[in-house]
Image (tube, grey):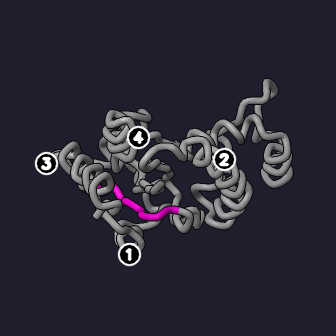
Amino acid sequence: MIQLGITGGIGSGKSTVCKVFASLGIPINDADSLAKKIIVEDPELKESIIQQFGSEAYFDNGDYNRTYISKIVFNNAEKLSILNSLVHPKVIAYSKKWTEKHAHHPYVIKEAALMFESGSYKANDYNIVVEAPLDIRIQRICIRDNAIAEDVLKRIQAQLSDDERREKADLIIYNDDKTSIIQQVYKIHQNILQNNDPR
């Protein structure tokens, strides 16, 4: 079984690409959604986050105070690194179990925004980067999150650049509102089924 990684900057359209793969019957492991879940449900991780960021990291009902944490980590690279060092090992461990459960499929996909930053890309057989022009990414996130462009740009700049991702990518999917995502995904899908190689 082949494991594909799909990553890309915020607003690039990773989730859209994954939906196309899912429509072909391919299991998708959304590492970011998994992280959100275990941040709330894993007692050991929860305690570690509170130790590093204070009790304000969680609301009284146990929910994660994402706004509070985001304000800290998106303006402080050291704090972001600390948060990632706590969350990523947990996500990787849970993801390994998930992959084992889906071993009967020809391939599976792990979707994660910080795949290269966390080092989890090394566990994949191939890594796909989804790219989109900066102005389109900013517009998408402003609409999705009801955010202002300046804040979105800060979030983008806190992540790796497209050039840095491209260096580690085996394949690029362009989501520029011009090139067909469906055709790009279907070609990768057929290459794996026929040649055991997505390229």
For label 2, the residue is: 97
Crowding around mark 3 (Cα neighbors within 10 Å: few <14, some 14 to 19, many 20+) is few
Q: Which residues are magenta?
A: 124-133
Can you give x and y, in whole percent of width and height, for residue 79 in the image?
A: 69, 61
For label 1, the residue is: 167
Type of amino acid at the residue the image marks with label 3: Lys
Residue sitting farthest toward the top: 61
Q: CA distance from mark 3 to mark 2?
A: 37 Å
Q: Is residue 189 left or right of residue 98?
A: left
Q: Nearer the viewer, residue 179 or 157?
A: 179
Type of amino acid at the residue the image marks with label 4: Ile
For label 3, the residue is: 178
Q: CA distance from mark 3 to mark 4?
A: 25 Å
Answer with mark 2 or mark 4, whichever residue precedes in sequence. Answer: 4
Q: CA distance from mark 1 to mark 3?
A: 24 Å
Crowding around mark 2 (Cα neighbors within 10 Å: few <14, some 14 to 19, many 20+) is few
Can you give x and y, in whole percent of width and height, for residue 98 in the image?
A: 61, 44
Is residue 158 placed above or below 146 in the rendered structure? below
Q: Nearer the viewer, mark 3 or mark 4?
A: 4
Q: Is residue 154 visible?
A: no
Q: How many marks?
A: 4
**Who's the residue at 56% across and 46% down the image?**
31
Type of amino acid at the residue the image marks with label 1: Glu
Q: Secondary structure at mark 4?
A: loop
Answer with mark 4 or mark 1, whichever residue precedes in sequence. Answer: 4
Can you give x and y, in whole percent of width and height, for residue 162 in the image?
A: 35, 66
Residue 156 is a magenta residue:
no
